[in-house]
Image (cartoon, rainbow, N blue to C red):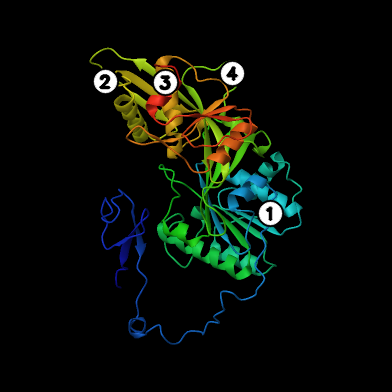
Amino acid sequence: MARPQVRHVCTACGSVQARWSGQCPDCGAWNTLQPEAVPAATPFARRHALKTGGQTLALAALDAAVALPERVSTGIGELDRALGGGLVPGSAILVGGDPGIGKSTLLLQAAGRMARAGRAVAYVSGEEAADQVRLRARRLGLADAPVALAAATSVRDILTTLAARPAPDLLVIDSIQTMHSDQLEGAPGTVSQVRASALELVAFAKERNTALVLVGHVTKDGQIAGPRVLEHMVDAVLYFEGERGHQYRLLRAVKNRFGGTDEIGVFAMAADGLVEVPNPSSLFLTERERPVPGAVVFPALEGTRPVLVEIQALTVRVPSGATPRRAVVGWDAGRLAMVLAILEARAGLALSGHEVYLNVAGGLRVTEPAADLAVAAALVSALADRPVAEGTVALGELALSGEVRRVAHADLRLKEAAKLGFTAALAPPGTRGVGALGILPCASVAALVSRLGLR
């Protein structure tokens, strides 16, 4: 009997290799090549062209007058926001996040609320027994929700069951790594099984006009486990983020074919499940009686939502000859090194002899360069041991020349700051104030140092 052929697929980039190796030659990732069986090629398949023998497709015009599908609300406003306005019938959504972050809780809450609203909902768990899901539903106050519940891992059993009844409006699969297709060999969770199971489920969702939600495990790096092609097969990818030590959770859209990307939904973990946070700025701002040195508020922008966060800095002088430490939480360490170099070269601040600690309060991660001026202001305030005036925010991008450049959507950011009672903003010249919030123009880091009173 001929030995079955095996190829190796990289779970990071999806490339196919004939032999296994420790490092993928295409993307350079280590220990990502997983074996899968090569489909058998018959002599007929080798000779037969794909230009004939198929069914003729009915091609429709792009501007054809057809009724477009309406979005379906999940009953959770923050989840609808991250999805771009709600679920689109026939769409496939992949939700990833760390274990215990609240993925199953959020989806069970959405399923229960949609079922109470009269929608047909099916929830299939491959990790928990049906009674365990019922216990969670009872804790969340959803014990009476008419959700069709099943505990199964066979894709064939799931599709056979759903084909014998009216198609549900929402189908939740928790999780895709536990699903198994009997058409392929291999244990659940392997590259071939995850890809084949997802393909069958997505095809069912498109055919029956059902909104499909797949829960995906993540790796140590925070990426969804399995081949990257899984993210290309779905219409939207949502990441559920948060720290165990903080009560908040962020639902971030990194891909959405039916809406904008980088939208976020904010939740707080409570005893009865996840609670929506309509004003997320309240989570990330520290309440104190008087201002302290090294703390500056930055109006960040998450998608189209402005969120005010507090950036905290601490500088400590080190003995001569010692190597100063740089510690960053919630910001890019490379960008901090650039800001420190600009302050030393363009403003004359001696920061090379100080240890620098930078933290974004609340555990939020800020990635946009608009936070450069806020970080610089926090560092200057910490070095001078003088607090920034109360009611002041800072925003602006720093150039290597020391100039402060304008940022996108400054008016939207400042409106949020004014709504929360802030009265001044350190910003590039030309930025317009909003209402009672005035502008303190800073054309360069030298002007920022002078305005903060270090000179």
- Residue type pointed to by label 4: Arg
- The residues tagged by marks 2 and 3 sit, at their Cα atoms, a distance apart of 29 Å
Tell me the element at label 3: helix
The residue that mark 3 highlights is 450
- 277 on left or right of 22: right
Query: Residue 434 at what x, y percent from top left?
Result: 60, 35
Q: Earlier in the sequence, mark 1 or mark 4?
A: 1
- Quarter that holds the N terminus: bottom left
Label placed on residue 323 = 2
Residue annotated with mark 4: 288
The amino acid type of the residue labelled 1 equals: Ser
Residue 368 in view of the camera? yes
Can you identify the residue that label 1 sits on?
Answer: 73
Residue type at the position of mark 3: Ser
Disc 4 to disc 3, C-alpha distance: 26 Å
Mark nearest the camera among 4 and 3 is 3
Query: Hey, what amino acid is under mark 2?
Result: Thr
- In this rendering, which labeled residue sits more in front, label 1 or label 4? 4
| Quadrant, the C terminus | top left
Marked residue nearer the N-terminal end (2 or 1): 1
Q: Regarding mark 4 in the picture, which secondary structure is present there?
A: loop
Left-right relation of 344 to 310: left
| Circle 1: element type | loop
